[in-house]
């Protein structure tokens, strides 16, 4: 229905558009209007590229909007997707009716060494060809465990393990991600604020939107409101699904 601008959902690092499928369906059922989920470059089914900056990822979304004839959208991004969404809103405010950043601030994120370790562990994975999928996943899980202690996080990373002609490989472009990890953890410099409504939706158990970040949020997004979902960690939409859907839906413009 053409009552609201389409809602575009951008996933985080090592994710894919499937992370938001349940969210998209729930929002459409509530009457959000059209929802799009997409794979970032070097993730999911999107093309691989050696370049992995927020400017490049923002341009990808801009090209897609142009291709689909969308002149204004509502942008929601989680983590890396949130930084892509903020970059796009700051670069092209005319394209973004409003913005929702899920558990991420427009400042550098300090988990560089942690992610470097995950990437090294993923790169050093050894799985014999021709193993059944369940055995391959179990073996991969065992090999990642010493570095990636959280079972939930290992399961998330393993959604990127795919079988191509009997060989197991990573669907994400680990080389490009590893080369641009500092860019992904950082945030580009902007001087001109985004004038539209913005919602920073954090998990109360996550450190990624903290009161220390409020001045910078305020500087770049003067119309921002910050909300926390009680009991949620970094993956807010997974930890507190219903509360997340309600918060997002309530922030949408009236139809």
Image (cartoon, rainbow, N blue to C red):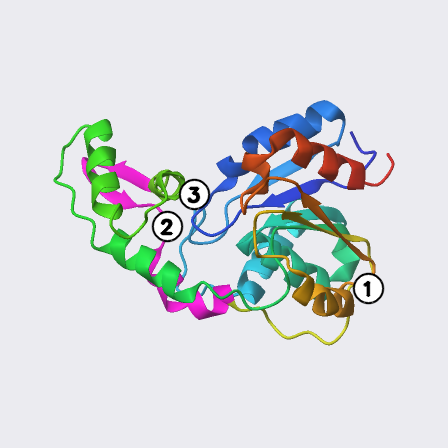
Q: Where the N terminus falls, by quadrant?
A: top right
Q: Earlier in the sequence, mark 1 or mark 2?
A: 2
The mark closer to the camera, 1 or 2, is 1
Q: Which residues are magenta?
A: 161-185
Q: Mark 2 or mark 3: which comes first in sequence?
A: 3
**Marks 3 & 1, CB-CB < 8 Å contact:** no
Residue 149 point in image, percent of width and height: 32, 47
Residue at image point 53% right, 64% down = 109
Q: CA distance from mark 1 to mark 2?
A: 35 Å
Location of residue 217 with respect to 137 vertically, above or below: below
- Dot 1: few (<14), some (14–19), or many (≥20) neighbours within 10 Å? some
Label 3 near label 2: C-beta < 8 Å?
no
Q: Position of residue 144 (x, y in %)?
A: 26, 47
Picture layout, residue 71 above or below residue 23: below
- Which element carries disc 3, helix, strand or loop? loop
Q: Which residue is mark 1?
A: 222
Regarding mark 2 in the picture, which secondary structure is present there? Answer: loop
Q: Residues within 10 Å of mark 2 (few under 14, many from 20)?
A: many
**Mark 3 to mark 1 CA distance (whole Å):** 36 Å
- Residue at 53% from the left image edge and 69% from the top image edge: 186
Q: Foreground residue, 187 or 244?
A: 244
Left or right: residue 106 compared with residue 31: left
- Residue pointed to by mark 3: 45
Q: Position of residue 169 (x, y in %)?
A: 25, 45
Q: Which residue is mark 2?
A: 172
- Of mark 3 and mark 1, the one earlier in the sequence is 3
| Residue 137 picture location, percent across and down | 25, 35
Q: Is residue 105 magenta?
A: no
Compared across the picture, whether 130 is left or right of 220 comes to left
Alpha-carbon span between mark 2 and mark 3: 9 Å
Residue 211 versus residue 160 in the image, above or below:
below
């Amino acid at each position: 229905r053409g009552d609201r601008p389409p809602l575009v959902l951008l996933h985080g690092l090592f994710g894919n558009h499937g992370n938001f499928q349940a969210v998209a369906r729930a929002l459409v059922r509530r009457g959000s209007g059209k929802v799009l989920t997409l794979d970032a470059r070097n993730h999911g089914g999107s093309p691989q590229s050696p370049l992995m900056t927020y400017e490049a990822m923002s341009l990808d979304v801009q090209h897609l909007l142009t291709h689909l004839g969308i002149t204004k959208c509502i942008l929601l991004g989680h983590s890396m997707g949130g930084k892509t969404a903020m970059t796009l809103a700051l670069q092209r405010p005319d394209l973004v009716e409003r913005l929702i950043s899920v558990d991420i601030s427009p400042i550098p994120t300090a988990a560089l060494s942690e992610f470097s370790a995950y990437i090294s562990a993923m790169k050093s994975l050894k799985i014999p060809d021709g193993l059944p999928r369940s055995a391959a996943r179990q073996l991969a899980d065992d090999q990642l465990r010493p570095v990636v202690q959280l079972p939930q996080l290992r399961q998330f990373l393993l959604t990127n393990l795919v079988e191509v002609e009997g060989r197991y490989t990573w669907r994400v472009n680990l080389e490009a991600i590893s080369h641009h990890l500092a860019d992904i953890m950082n945030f580009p410099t902007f001087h001109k604020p985004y004038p539209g409504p913005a919602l920073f939706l954090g998990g109360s158990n996550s450190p990624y939107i903290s009161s220390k970040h409020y001045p910078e949020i305020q500087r770049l997004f003067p119309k921002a409101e910050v909300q926390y979902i009680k009991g949620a960690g970094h993956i807010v939409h997974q930890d507190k699904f219903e509360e997340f859907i309600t918060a997002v839906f309530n922030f949408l413009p009236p139809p």
